[in-house]
Amino acid sequence: MNTDNVVVDTDWDVIYAYTRTQALDDGVLVDVSEMAREAGFVWPVAVTAAVWAIVEDIPARFQGIQSIEGRLWDLVWMAYCAIRQAQHPGTQLAYSLIMHHGRKTYLTLKLVTGPGDHGEPVVTIMLPGED
């Protein structure tokens, strides 16, 4: 069956499905929607566990100067700014921000929009190599 260039194969049974809710419950995704709303997002926003680990991993030289909340704010605010500045918005957008982690100063992230468990729009922020 072909509808609007989307191929739907109805002859296959789903063997396994892993929902966004399960990923949030398991800690694979971390819900940051509350702070993201403050930054201007209207859709739910989650970050991957790998991104969250970077947010939490404040280098020793910045202990007492940076906080998890401040680093998270920078991450969601810069994501919001990247969306607003995008010339050709789509379902994926790469953006960079200053976030000290390890010996690095800059962090490049991938913002992906898509359907949630019930078809609602959601945003996921991840490392470039994640999907």
Image (spheres, grey):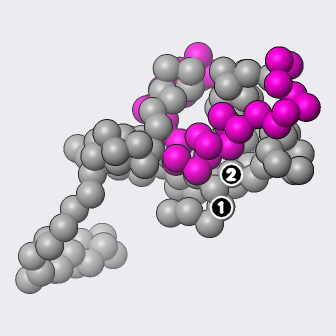
Q: Position of residue 97 (x, y in %)?
A: 81, 41
Asked if the residues shown at circle 1 and circle 2 are in contact, with their CB atoms under 8 angstroms apart, the answer is yes
Please tell me which residue is depicted at 27% across the width and 51% down the height of the picture.
19
Identity, as a three-letter code, of the amino acid under mark 1:
Pro
86 shown above or below 3: above
Please tell me which residue is depicted at 49% across the width and 20% down the height of the picture.
34
Q: Residue furthest bottom?
A: 11
Measure the alpha-carbon separation of dots 1 and 2. 6 Å
Sequence-earlier tag: 1 or 2? 2
Figure quadrant of the N terminus: bottom left
Res 107 visible: yes
Identity, as a three-letter code, of the amino acid under mark 2:
Leu
* Magenta highlight range: 37-65
Q: Residue 41 sits in which quadrant?
A: top right
11 shown above or below 27: below
Q: Which residue is mark 2?
A: 109
Q: Which mark is residue 47?
A: none
Please tell me which residue is depicted at 26% across the width and 57% down the height of the picture.
18
Q: Answer left or right for 105 relative to 42.
A: right
Q: Position of residue 38 (x, y in %)?
A: 59, 16
Q: Position of residue 39 (x, y in %)?
A: 63, 22
Q: Which residue is mark 1?
A: 128
Q: Which residue is nearer to you in this view: 57 or 30?
A: 57
Res 120 visible: no
Q: Is residue 43 magenta?
A: yes
67 shown above or below 61: above
Q: Which residue is nearer to you in this view: 36 or 113?
A: 36
